[in-house]
Amino acid sequence: MQTDSDSEGGFKEIKPAPFNRASETSLSHSSTTSISLKTINITLGLAVMLTSLVIVIFFLPTWVKSNKSADTSGNTAVHTESKISSADNSNKIPTSTPPVKAVIEQLSPEEQALNIALRKEAQNSLQEILEKQKTLEENNAEVWAGEDFVKGLNHAKNGDSLYKQQQFSEANIAYQKALVQFNPLHEQIDIIYQENIDHGNNALDTGDANLALTAFKKAALFTDEAGQATVGLERAQKLDKVFANIELGNEMLNEGRLNDAKTAYQTALEIDPDTKLAQQKLKETNRFLADKQFNAFMSAGYAALDRQGFAKALNQFNNALKVKPNASAAKTALQQTKHQATALDIANTLKQAAASETNEQWQTAIDFYSNALKLEKNLAEAQSGRLRSQKMLTISQRLDQILSRPERLSDKKVHAETEVYYKQVNQLDRRGPLLSKQLAELEILLQVSATPVMIQLQSDNLTEVIVYKVGKMGIFESKELSLRPGKYIAIGKRDGYRDVRIEFLVSQDTSRQAVRIAAKDKIN
């Protein structure tokens, strides 16, 4: 038994026993002689021996040579001791075995070939055992597998002993028994590791520190590449403090002290940020706080809405929406506030427009109705009001225009058109003081403009006088003329003299007035 690795409970790979060239030559010579002696046998015997000859000539030298080169180091051939250990390390395995030349020479070629094949199979099994054993030992299988792992070691040790005795078939059986023990254990490594990780995490979630510690300690026996067991152990050691703060938070929550509960849960998460229960409780508490703040904003908003404090109501509902961006109640309240504010604005605007109409401030009324239509484009009252005010503004402006130029009424056509227009306007039902005054003034103006006024035209009895829209007056010294009130133009013409043009206004106040028309400027 070898030193360091044997004491660790493992075993090294067994290398094939050596064959020397003398035995190889002897075997070749023996088989040749045997075949020559048996050529006289029956056909069946010949066939069997021919087959044996093929094996010995083509296969056996290659196998012997390869195994010989693997087993020989210099001129000395030794067995490499297997490193399989059992729970009892007191059984020592010899470090070498007697030469097998004599044994091999006693075997027939067929038996030698079979022996080599069995030996190779045993080596392969042994290699697999070594790999499985190494992995199991790295994952402390002796701790969690116990008796099953020890049984596997003992079967491997037994196989090693049989191998050294050249009992390769029996060694293979022993090695397979070892694999029967090792394989299930090898397959359970990841399963048992993960099960303990899961159990530990579940215990962390429920606050069972003892169970968490037990599970993570067992998981730590395995290769912990992701560090889950290490992290779990650290968390488990802080679990009591974490859950103490969670319990404190629960008490505060039951008493309605939301801010204190939030502080307790935050403290728990500062100790272990991954505690799911603390995360859930903090989230729940934040939701309660949000609900409380949301309800406060909504109540303040509706109170302001009742007082028609639309600006404040909008502010409160917007604050509520910031707390809960998807809250339909806050969105509905905002729409309701905007609607009521718009409705009130429209009502006030229409009221101001109506007042402007009453005061016959037609342009102001039009502006108010236009503002109302900006708030609600299909508002019928505003549409009809604006049309009405635009019509009255047009009437008022035309009446002002007529009254500002009364002289135009001296024209019979203009007078007739104005009289028709007067009658149309006079039929309106809604007439304010200003419109009534305008109509009264126009009525008088129409009457006055239709009543002729006597005026006196004077000349020098040398100038020919023409009055536009009246006719030629001829040459005279004095002449009376009956004219309707209005503005007139008289032209005086005389040969050799410059024409003279006189504009004069005829009104009731200018009755019997004298208008002199005479050309006095001689042309040089």
Image (spheres, grey):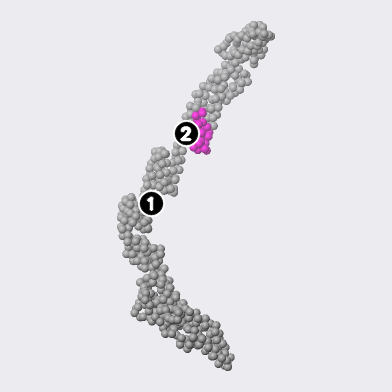
What residue type is disc 2 on?
Thr
Q: Is residue 186 above or below residue 107?
A: above
Quick check: 287 left or right of 502?
left
Residue carrying label 2: 349
Residue range in magenta is 362-386
Viewer-proximal residue among 163 and 158: 163
Which quarter of the rendering shows the N terminus? bottom left
Q: Nearer the viewer, residue 448 or 352?
A: 352
> x and y percent of residue 149 in the render?
38, 75
Q: Give me the residue at 39% from left, 70% from top.
A: 138
Asked whether residue 435 appears in the rendered view, the answer is: yes
Instruction: Note whether 352 is above or below 115 in the view shown.
Output: above
Query: Quadrant location of residue 476?
Result: top right
Q: Secondary structure at mark 1?
A: helix
Q: Nearer the viewer, residue 249 or 267?
A: 267
Q: Amino acid at mark 1?
A: Arg
Does residue 178 sit above or below 349 in this rendering? below
